[in-house]
Amino acid sequence: MAQYLRGTAAVAVIRLCNPPLNTLSPATLRALERDVNHVNTDPAVKAAVICGENGKFSAGADIKGFPSIGQGDMPSLESVISLIEKSEKPMVAAIEDMAYGGGLEVALGCHYRIANVQARVALPEVTIGLLPGAGGTQRLPRLIGVPAALDIITTGRHVPATEALKLGILDELVEGNTVEAAINLAERVSGQPLEPRRLCLKQTPRLPNMEAILDEAFMKVKKQANGCLSPEMCFQAVKASVYFPFSEGIRKERELFHFLLTSGQATALQYAFFAQRLAEKWALLSGASWKTAVPQPVRRAAVIGLGTMGQGIVASLVKAKIPVVALEQDKKQLEQAREAVMALLEQEALRMQQNGQKPDGCKPDLPQFTLDFGALKNVDMVIEAVFEDMALKKEIFHKLSIVCKPEAFLCTNTSYLDIDEIASVTSHPHQVIGTHFFSPAHRMKLLEIIYGQQTSPTAIATAMRLGKAMGKIGVVVGNCFGFVGNRMLNPYIEQTYFLLEEGSTPEEVDKALQGFGFKMGPFRVSDLAGLDVGWRSRKGQGLTGANLPPGTPPHQRDGKRYSPLPDILCEKGRFGQKTGKGWYQYDKPGGRVAKSDPWLHSFLPEYRSAHNIITRTISQDEILERCLYSLANEGFRILSDGIASCPEAIDTIYINGYGWPRHRGGPMFHASEVGLPRILAKLSKYAEANPDIPKLQPSAFLQKLVALGSPPLKEWSSHVGSQNSNL
């Protein structure tokens, strides 16, 4: 609840009190309304300061309470803000730490805003499929202009206090006691006219070329949104502030807010928000969990293998202010890695500077680059990041087991390989854990944390905490080939090859998936990542190359359908962007602009004819169904096998590591929205038509869920047989 206190003889202090983040719950709103009314009617009070309890202003409205806002006798947030704004006594917002969403909207309703230098402000509703619904889209552009307001509202980005002061969101910044400074400001401005300070009375600044600015801004927002509605609706609401009076702008904002609130995208985005938090709460069958396992401090870490991935991991550790030893076996590669890491750190510093972020004064230690394995003897954790070769990894881990102290955690950055086999060559297998980073590691958020049969809960907890310190979203998963993300990816990618064989083109497949919301289609992604990466893996598995038994049919492996198409492209040196040609062609090696490749379009009919494949026209719907339903189908198998603890973990992995559009919730959420009976029926249809593709056969767990009447997603995990569960 808000607390009504007397600051001085003339200034009242109203505290928002709803720990831990002072969210604007119904009770907090009612208390705020009551206390503002008290200030307005108490003749002894000349001004008021609104602040938050425990050094935090407010993180805004509670997401779970959005549907009930304004219902019954509960005051709406906008009505309370309007009450603050219309007060005849100066209202000063004292912002400490954060003012997000409705918290910033409350501050915008105040006549003055003051903050400490550590504070950040934001209107992040766009990230959960909504828009600021309490006047934020109307007050902010009136205060700072349309371009700056659009940038903040359509991205939801956090704005540091220093930048907020330059933009005009804040009136003052303070180093010391924010509330005391706000009381002093309130005393100074008491008795001054308030009309110029009421944003509802201001006009949004009109620039000479406003139409062109809005047109350009809309195209930019639409392009970045990739089918997500909320950024476009945010734009429309801000645009209304330019052309309509405040009261009509508020009506437009409310109309757009309720449109988004009832849209499926808001549901998906809010699901993704909570799914990520649920995925962090890991538990093992042994009873160990995030609640009971105690992470150990990592005071010094090491990274072995300084290719692109290793360089990104080193940069992430430095950014997290963890001293790091960077080990490479070749002197030339070591020097190249040193230059690359320093360049990454410089780029990061420049990015922070451009975003108005200041270093916190504690300069991180630079990495210690070395060729000497002995330099690892005192580190608390080693992250091995050499390429995917089991023999090499086992050689390194055997050596680490000898060189490192017994309590050191030994992590392997692997995309597919067996954690238990790697751990078997060490004397401390309980200290071995998989840490699957995603490239580029200094930017990508996802971190798959893979435990083996003997991995200790302490190792899991330590890896999770380290991931958080590095700014990663850690998800704990079980040990199998490809874990969760890449295991699911295989049948999805297989379908894209089969669709090409049957008559589709890279452009058609990419168009369908990009239309669904992916920023890039699978063939564009393949060209970007490099076709040789998958080729190397397939050769290692004996699916192609020298290890393939003589006489193996080109379209079969172990009795299952196989597409040699990507292997043929690699044999022709078509590795994607790096060679200037892959599924598409580029103007030069390293080029980024994909163009349709005449060679490929003449090659595909020849390939189909040579392999007696009957071609047909494939619809966009079939492309989506075969790709996305195959992905979800493998997700159901993963749940049944106990590799992932819940569908929310799978969706968190796909949103943060594999480009799944957040406004679609994740592959498992999407399956629940489509309807499990429909998924089952479609998979059954495609499996019947393609009996040689076993991954199209509906998983037993999907069939079980449909037989149970398709329970809601949150109940799926409870129907997994405990005898099969690893997590």
Image (cartoon, grey):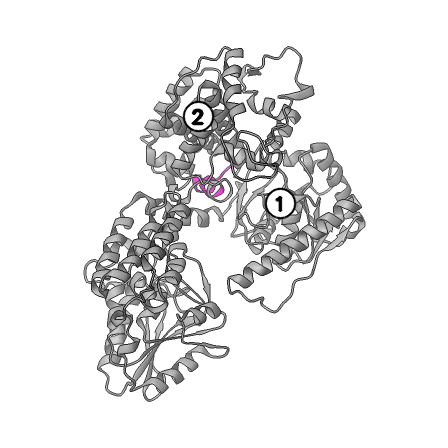
State the quadrant of the N terminus: bottom left
Image point (27%, 47%), residue name: 262
Place residue 451 in its image quadrant. top right
Nearer the observer, 435 or 181: 181
Q: Quadrant of residue 398?
A: top right
Q: Residue at x 28, y 85 (%)?
A: 45
| Label 1: which secondary element | loop
Residue tagged 1: 456
Say the numbered circle drawn on residue 233: none
Residue 508 locus on image (x, y percent): 42, 28
Viewer-nearest of discs 1 and 2? 2
x, y percentage for residue 388?
A: 66, 35
Name the image quarter holding residue 15.
Answer: bottom left
- Three-letter amino acid code at disc 2? Ser
- Comparing 88 with 645, the one in front is 88
Taken as a whole, is the magenta stretch helix, strand or loop?
A: helix
Tell whether label 2 touches label 1 (CB within 8 Å): no
Label 2 secondary element? loop
